[in-house]
Image (tube, coloured by chain):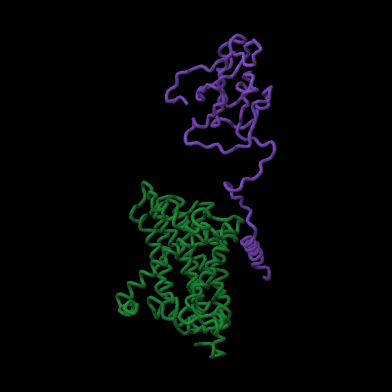
Amino acid sequence: MPQVGQGILKGMGVTLQHLFGQKITRQYPEYKRELPERSRGMLTVDMDRCIACLQCMRICPDHCISIEQTKRDADGSGKPKPFAVGFVIDDSRCMYCSLCVEVCPVNCIYHTEEFEAQAYNRLELARQFGELPVDPTVDPKPAVGKKKKPTGKKAPKTVEKPRTGDEAA
Amino acid sequence: MQTVLNLLEVEPIRLLISFGAVLFLVLNLAAVLTMAERKVSGYIHLRYGPNRVGPRGLLQPAADVFKLFTKENVSPGRSDLWVFLGAPIAMFIPAALVWLVVPFAPDAVVADLNVAILFFVAITSIGALGVVMAGYGSRSAFSLLGALRGAAQMISYEVPLILSLLGVVMLSGSLSLVDIVRAQGDTIWSWYFLFQLPMFLTFYISGIAEVKRVPFDLPEGESEIVGGFMIEYSGMTWALIQAAEFASMAVMSAITVTLFLGGWQPPLPFLDLGAFNWVWFGIKTALIMFTFQWIRWSVPRLRMDQLMDLGWKVLVPLTLIWLFVTAGLMLVFPSLGA
């Protein structure tokens, strides 16, 4: 009998302590906590270093990177090399898996600490990095194994497929 | 100013004005208590609670009301519409009516009934009707479950609630709430909650059960029947149910204060504020309401069988025993009675 209600009183003591205790809420928009060093935010590309090897575009599981590739003599060596005129990262598809960062041979694509990706329109989430805009709604990767890719000669360009209901970005 | 005060002496005008004041009080209590509930819950969870609208979130009730007014009122397709829409009203009116007999200060009571306790008991038991109406009218399985639980619970706890009042009635010799407060005297140890401690605790516990708050919120059962009898309500009908809940919670606190904690009486004679003694009533009622919220965020919900056990096997025998103890003591010491 003397134990009746002791548990309730103990619990209510804890809640009373909490009532006057220090709050642990972080007031987010005013206060932002420091992110860990290797946190994965939105992707960004250093276009000066990009060699348009298209590896990031190929490895991306979500097909969120599209690259428009040409040949251009950018460094004045007299030999035209692959050059990315258009580069788009569609954040509405990116799942921050970091595969493109791992695969990039020149470390030009990397995560920033920026994570607040929001827009009123899905297409606004596609960020353009190149000189020419690339349509982010078109799947950059052709279907695997169906057609033999024209290797070596021509880079796989983004193919315009007729789609209904798509507005170009 | 004097003419306005004189108008208060004229009977129909006095009634209308005081009725309007009570309605104003009840509707605002719902808003303020919603705010307090969210703040207390936040603080107990080590959060801040709502703090975006206005200074420290104090305008949150206004935002809530605005949101609820603009919401569409959806009713289930096969619901019994008249019963469905009548249920919130049937819940709100009893909760608001009891305020008519609550004495805020010696002369500040809308109707000083000589059977005020009977009125209180009769009106609060009507509240169960609203719950059953809501559960039946929604035509939803969860609603009906909640309503049946609510009916069983509210009717079971009506018994210890009424029995626990009898000790106070015996001591004061009156059913009028004003007389009961007067009989308690203006010192804290002469209030009834000390001598009638088991009755006070029983009234408090069954009061919580009567207004369907956590540990006894089985009719609502957020985690199992997702809102119970109020699951199908939205917009203003839902808001009216919430207002009814908070109003009945406030009225239960007010009646607890009136019966056991000396109503408007100051805790010590020198603290008498004269015409401002309603402040004491307000402070005590607010404290009881805070303990309701404190308990809500500390104690887990009872099972249905535990609920019935507590009501019928603990509270009812306890009140009956203490009724006999009170009667025996009054027989031995006749000075106890008023």
- Could you tell me residue A109's position as x and y percent? 64, 27
Q: Is residue A138 left or right of residue A17?
A: left
- Could you tell me residue A121's position as x and y percent? 47, 33
- Could you tell me residue B259's position as x and y percent? 50, 77
Q: Is residue B96 above or below residue A131?
A: below
Q: In this orientation, which residue lies closer to the viewer: B161 or A14?
A: A14
Which residue is painted at 46% across and 51% down in the image? B142
Which residue is painted at 62% across and 32% down in the image? A96
| Residue B135 in sight | no
- Could you tell me residue B103's position as x and y percent? 44, 77
Which residue is painted at 35% across and 77% down in the image? B1
Q: How many marks?
A: 0
| Residue B53 in sight | yes
Q: Is residue B122 above or below residue B62?
A: below
Q: Is residue B2 left or right of residue B172?
A: left
Query: Which of the 4 image quarters holds residue B113?
Result: bottom left
Residue furthest front in the image: A76
Residue furthest top in the image: A153
**Chain letter, colour purple:** A
Chain B rendering hue? green
